[in-house]
Image (cartoon, grey):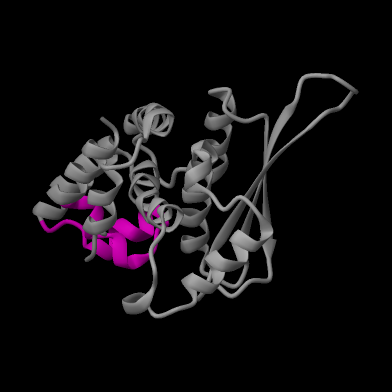
Amino acid sequence: MFIDVEAWALAQAFSLGRWQMLLKQLVEHFDTYTCLPVGVNTVRDQIVDLGIQDEIRFHMVEIDPTILRGLIYRYSKHNVPYGEPILCTDICLAKDQEYEWQRVVAVKELLHITDTDPETAQSEGAVEKLIERLSLPFEIREETRSSLNDRVHFIPALAILVPKDVRDILRDLRQRDKITPIDVARMAKIPDRYGAMVLTDLFEDVVSDLCK
């Protein structure tokens, strides 16, 4: 069981503003869901409904999931000259990773839609440097604002895929030995390693702090 407390703490020093507002809206919207699994497309549609983005598409691509599980590309287009810009997002997911990982990474990448410029890779060269950095062993990896931001998004992604009302129900069942952490992960369709983590008090504290 692992929560990236370092990334969480560092995130508090960032100017989260707009990101926090949208994050709070998204998490609170899904808090009352009581059916699992939560669909990735449902999360996508909610972001569109909030007016943050007009079009969002997912693509399964050939990338090494041990280095990079997902990537987001944001851009705008115009259907007519001088018309209103259409805000678009393409999210690429490593197709050779497990379905449960695809779900978590897809939602995490969706949350990146609200990143500010300092929190994103702004050029092809910056993306290549980010991938190179991610391929290094964790102990010697140089952290940047964008890489820390990427780690921070993982917690709210799990909170959306395992909403608060569901967590309360599952926590009670777990305390009465009716289910196991693996059961939790399988019901929510998230990686097995996070089945226990999403039921902890620490997880609730982190989610609460990120959504202030």
Q: Residue at x 83, y 19 (%)?
A: 83
> Within the magenta stretch, is there residue 76?
no
- Residue 184 against residue 211 in the figure, above or below: below
Give the image quarter of residue 179: bottom left
Q: Quadrant of the C terminus?
A: top left
120 and 156: which is toward the camera: 120
167 and 14: which is toward the camera: 14
Toward the right, the furthest residue is: 81
Give the magenta range.
177-200
- Residue 160 against residue 193 in the figure, above or below: above
208 and 201: which is toward the camera: 208
Q: Position of residue 134 (x, y in %)?
A: 47, 71
Q: Residue at x 22, y 36 (%)?
A: 208
- Residue 178 against residue 112 in the figure, above or below: below
Left or right: 79 in relation to 125: right
Q: Position of residue 16 (x, y in %)?
A: 37, 35
Q: Quadrant of the N terminus?
A: bottom left
158 and 181: which is toward the camera: 158
Q: Residue at x 54, y 39 (%)?
A: 113
- Residue 22 against residue 186 in the figure, above or below: above
Left or right: 143 in relation to 212: right
> Within the magenta stretch, is there residue 181?
yes
